[in-house]
Amino acid sequence: MSDIFQGYERVSDFSDGTDEILSPRLTPRQLSEIARFARAREFAPGEMLFEHGQPEAPFFVIEEGEVGFLDRRADGDRYFAKVSAGTFVGDISMFTGEPTIAACLAATPCRVLEMDRATLQRLVAQFPDVGDLLLRTMMARRAWLENHDYGSLQLIGSRWSRDTFRLRDFLTRNQVPFRWHDPATDEDSRVLLDSLSVTEDQTPVIIAAGKVFRRPQVADVASALGLLPALRGAQDPPYDLVVVGAGPGGLAAAVYGASEGLRTLVLDADSPGGQAGTSSKIENYLGFAAGISGNELARQAVLQARKFGATFSNPLAVETMAERDGVKTLSLSDGSEIRARAVVLAMGAEYRRLDALDIERYEGSGIYYAAGASEAVQCSGEEVIVVGGGNSAGQAAMFMSGYARKVHVVIRGDDLSHSMSQYLIERIEQSPNVQVLTRTKVAAVHGDGRLSQVTLIGPEGSFCVDASAVFVMIGAVPRTQWIARLGCVGLDGNGFVLTGGGRHGEAFDDLWRLERDPYFLETTCPGVFAVGDVRSGSVKRVASAVGEGSMAVKFVHEVFAG
């Protein structure tokens, strides 16, 4: 082992492959089950099993020999782990198809069992005990890698740059491990930029697997990270189910659709999780007594859907939809087209924009519509304002109170009891650094390149608050702009999607063209369903959206049967 890795830095917290959680031993029966799906291969010492940043890397079980792992960095490779015969190689990227976050090479002559991702998914589905072990270990390994800072890409950019914030937010919400450095406060990152001949006007910069991306767009990063896989084209057999939007409702539809054998594709214009994914903690969702963050809930749901074979692509938006002979053709924002036998609309809703002076100028550099880890970094130790009186605003206020010096909750009403759960009200009342400003609104925001002050109007007139961030969580606007242009999918007066079932009203009946009654959750376009916040009359709760997403798949089968 030492000869092969002699030229590499060996880390102090080296993993030698003896940890039963990170390197479980496979039983003879499990090895036999895996062998039915795999092909045998051999590697010579020093030969690569896969490289850092390689998408669609195969899955390997080590039958004989040892392999080691390298963390490729701009300042030199690091040797951080090894595994030996009797266990398997890789973390969750082997299952999702995303680029690997480490390199793996043979340390001794090795004999392995190899299978591609599609075969691995079939194995997991057919042998649940093996699948549970593999997934549990892969998730544990990813957590270990993130906690030890191995395999993380580097993001270098100013704390107050909109472009830096967009990249940080995208990486965080897509569960991509990364390290962020602000060159204004981090001398090492400035030295690294100089060594790469990167000037300040070329930041933000992403460094991944030895590659440097200067001022990349989110779509460029998504493509490099394997988040935009090749899709079935207009000439290929259609998908059985296309889910538009990856919030709780869309993710539930993906899990149930894929688990029931439907060829399922999930598209999202941003990142999995939707509005719920931005929540720092969801405490009233059944089964999670200690609560769960929206980001973690989305992470588990995406993995669950992928386990059953669902394909995810984001950021990728739908721009138009047409129907011919019962098959829907969807035109996408990258200029491509896909076809689907059924569609579930789960685009969700977004918070309304504030009607205040200079708001747009500071969006992404002081004005935010979520309160998660990305945003918390922006305002640590400073004063912030949360606008809104609902549960999301309450959760944001409590989360930010752990980072900010002071949190001002601004509401137009007389108190929080009309729209916020009592447990959140009590926590806000007991928090010494949270202040509720009733009958108050934001009039204007000010700053010089970054937000620094906010003008409020309250019962006693206008006054100013020094604040570095305003979190806006007021009302909900459905993400149906592209739907409104179609004409075939009916919307209510507020832009939410009309659906069948029960008393759906004249507006729905005027557009429904079939003799049969519409199924529950079916829109005025047969075979197209709407779930979650985007649906007219829905209960705006995570649990409700999940229930609707799972129900929609049942009615998709009814459409196919009919």
Image: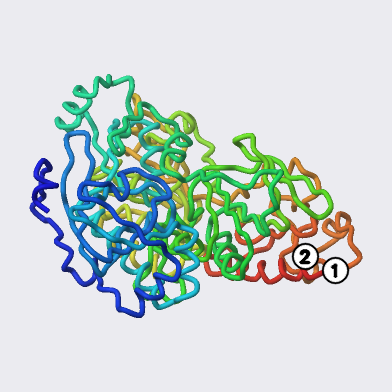
Q: Residue at x 16, y 52 (%)?
A: 80
Q: Residues within 10 Å of mark 1 (few under 14, many from 20)?
A: few
In this picture the colour scheme is rainbow
Q: Is residue 341 left or right of residue 89?
A: right
Residue 508 in view (yes/no): yes
Q: Residue at x 28, y 47 (%)?
A: 48
Residue 42 in the image, given as x and y percentages of width and height: 30, 56
- For disc 2, the marked residue is 500
Q: Residue at x 27, y 45 (%)?
A: 152
Residue 545 in the image, given as x and y percentages of width and height: 58, 65
Residue 393 in view (yes/no): no
Return the disc, 1 or 2, that comes first in the chain's sequence: 2
Vertically, is 293 above or below 408? below
Quarter of the rendering containing residue 40 = bottom left
Q: Nearer the viewer, residue 43 or 510?
A: 43
Q: Amino acid at mark 1?
A: Asp
Dot 2: element? loop
Q: Which label number is shown at residue 190?
A: none
Q: Nearer the viewer, residue 61 or 562?
A: 61
